[in-house]
Amino acid sequence: MTGPPAPAAGPAEPDDPTVVAVERDASGRHLARELSPGAFLAPRPLLPCADRLRIALVGTRAGLLAGDDLRLHVSVGPGARLELIEPSGLVAYDHRGGRSAWRARIDIAAGGRLDWDGKPFVVAHGARVDRTMEVTLAAGARMLLRDTLVLGRSGERGGHVRARTRAVYDGRELLVEDLDLTDPEIRELPGVLGPNRIIGS
């Protein structure tokens, strides 16, 4: 069950982050404390579940272009559970020499849980993307994430991407990953990716 709707927001500015903040009240109800659309994604509540809040991240632009900076801030309160749904994947198009960024910041309080079944992130030929995810989990917090990175659309070799992920659990580093796929010659070597273009985790 969701709480009262948040006040209507004006048009998002180019650098506005998408904000999703959920909490659980004393009676055990899950409430959306903040659902703010950003420049690229708009959070939309889905039909309620008894044990969680389900929020769709709906794209409001046709992918990432040169100069774009997509930012997403997600917070889950103590004991709350959030499920993020992506109706479609995201494509970073040919940047024609420019760059773009995709940055997510996730904060999960004690006993909170985030389930995020992410759709494919496609890096088209000519794109150059910096992708960063920072996750902070309190003691007893949990996060289940599916992440799929696709290098190129059909028939393409794929653009340049560097994906960094850092997760901290109860003040200690849990995962630190720096995936540098900016050089096609190196990433296509045997023992790296070879001829493969899809990375799932």
Image (cartoon, grey):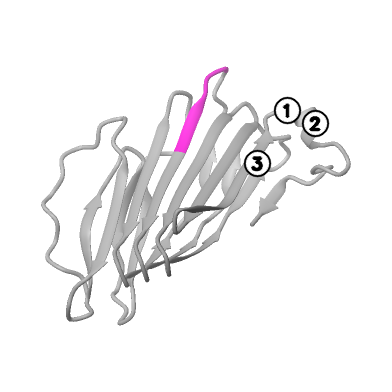
Marking on residue 186: 2
Answer with left or right where residue 63 lies relative to residue 198. Answer: left
- Mark 1 or mark 3, which has the lower sequence index? 3
Residue at point 17% right, 77% down? Answer: 26
Bin the neighbour count of mark 1 within 10 Å (Cα to Cα): few under 14, some 14-19, many 20 and up.
Answer: few
Residue 93 seen from this side: no
Answer with left or right where residue 174 lies relative to residue 158. Answer: left
Marking on residue 153: 3
Q: Give the quarter of the figure containing the C terminus.
A: bottom right
SS category of the residue bearing label 2: helix
Residue 28 seen from this side: yes
Answer with left or right where residue 37 lies relative to residue 87. Answer: left
Bin the neighbour count of mark 3 within 10 Å (Cα to Cα): few under 14, some 14-19, many 20 and up.
Answer: some
The reply to whether the C-beta atoms of the residues labelled 2 and 1 are less than 8 Å apart is yes
Residue at point 84% right, 42% down? Answer: 194
Magenta range is 97-102
Outermost residue to the right:
190
